[in-house]
Image: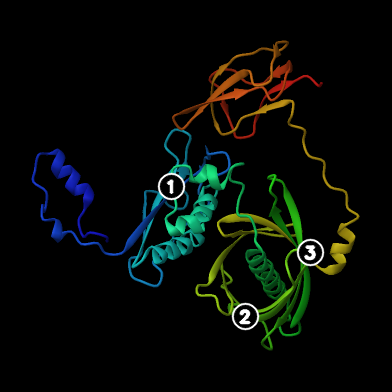
Amino acid sequence: YITGFDLVEEMIRSAAGLPLTTTDQSAVKINGWAIESRVYAEDPEKYLPSIGTLSKYQEPRSWRAENNVRCDSGISEGSEISMFYDPMICKLSTHGATRADAIATMNHALDRYLIKGVTHNIPLLRDVVSNTDFGSGRITTAFLAEHYPGGFKGHRLTSETAGQLATASAAMQFIRQARESSDHVAARVAEYVLLLPQLQDDGSVHKLEARVSLALDSAAVNLQGTNSFTATTVYDNGEYPPTTSKLDISWDVDMPFVELCQPGQENALTLQYLDPLPLGFRVQFMGTKFDIDVLLPRQRELLRFMKEKERLDTSKLVLSPMPGTIVSVAIAPGDVVAEGAEVAVVEAMKMQNVLRAPRAGTIKAVHVQPGATVGGDDILIELEDE
């Protein structure tokens, strides 16, 4: 694509003592830009591998130009990502006439890459590629440390992306309800209250409330294809101004991909509808998975009186960070340990991970022994209550 030469072939020729295809530098032309993203079955927040069966798998295709998206992979839907091999899924490459073109194509390709069954690093790849410093070439080996000093936690919504996610989710709920109804002609307006996960500076997650009023621009919902809406969105945080906008939503009934197009937007955005949830659904947007509550106004009023489910106290537990094999156990019941002391080692995908005590205390129970196979988040060791 870039030079017209197969660089791997040239390296093999050089290693074999054969002459290069050409030694005329003027014959090496530069044709545009290319970018490669390495897609891994890996938790992008903890940088730990993930294993499982690819229950859904669909690679992206070329977009706006022939052969400008390339997937070098050796797997397909139903393939197993095991703990015995490297967790790479694919080398995803895109080409464009300019760096901006190659980046736009990469963003689109990552948005259209469907992977279910394992955790993957597309959220991090998508966030990096869409970063303005990356786009302008202001990158060093300290890029991740500089842009994610507390670690990567997912895409952080801005006023623009919050609006896109809120209006698209409201429109998706409108279409979902029409598909489930026997009468898709009657309803042309609707109002929803959406609770969007909003990442905070300290790494915590706050529910951003957005009230979206929708008006369908046609006489009936198109159950298969494109629908046009007028949406008015009001937020509860006092930071984002209310907006009124037009949007087109394209969603085929048998596909997870949802295209959002708004006036003045050069390229349509792609969301992935992943799973239904008790109060809404899970979507992938800007690479990150969002669990979104989509409520009627009356439901939102009543939800305020519901008690939140208590979270499991993990301060006295040592959990396996990934599926793997226990290499060693350094403690026994009754031992007194200091905070950070080594308690076990787990191995997966050619890597050994030292597990340490989350706090000082006395070991209450050890549930594993060397050679045991464990799953991610399995309880390995318990400490006595403080």
Q: Name the residue under label 3.
A: 238
Q: Which of disc 2 and disc 1 is earlier in sequence? A: 1
Name the side, left or right, on which 355 lies relative to 215. Answer: left
Which kind of residue does numbered mark 3 sit on?
A: Gly
Q: In this view, does 256 lie above or below 16?
A: below
Alpha carbons under labels 1 and 2: distance apart: 35 Å
Q: Name the residue under label 1.
A: 89
The disc label shown at residue 211, or none: none
Q: Is residue 120 above or below residue 252?
A: above
| Nearest to the observer: residue 134 or residue 7 | 134
Residue ID at (60%, 51%): 154
Residue ID at (71%, 74%): 174
Q: Name the residue under label 2.
A: 227
Name the side, left or right, on which 201 lies relative to 327. Answer: right
In the image, residue 266 lies at what x, y percent?
50, 75
Residue ID at (70%, 55%): 198
| Nearest to the observer: residue 174 or residue 241 | 241
Q: Is residue 304 above or below residue 296?
A: above
Q: In this view, does 274 lie above or below 225?
A: above
Q: Is mark 1 on a helix, strand or loop?
A: strand
Q: Which of disc 2 and disc 3 is earlier in sequence? A: 2
Q: Can residue 127 be seen in this view?
A: yes
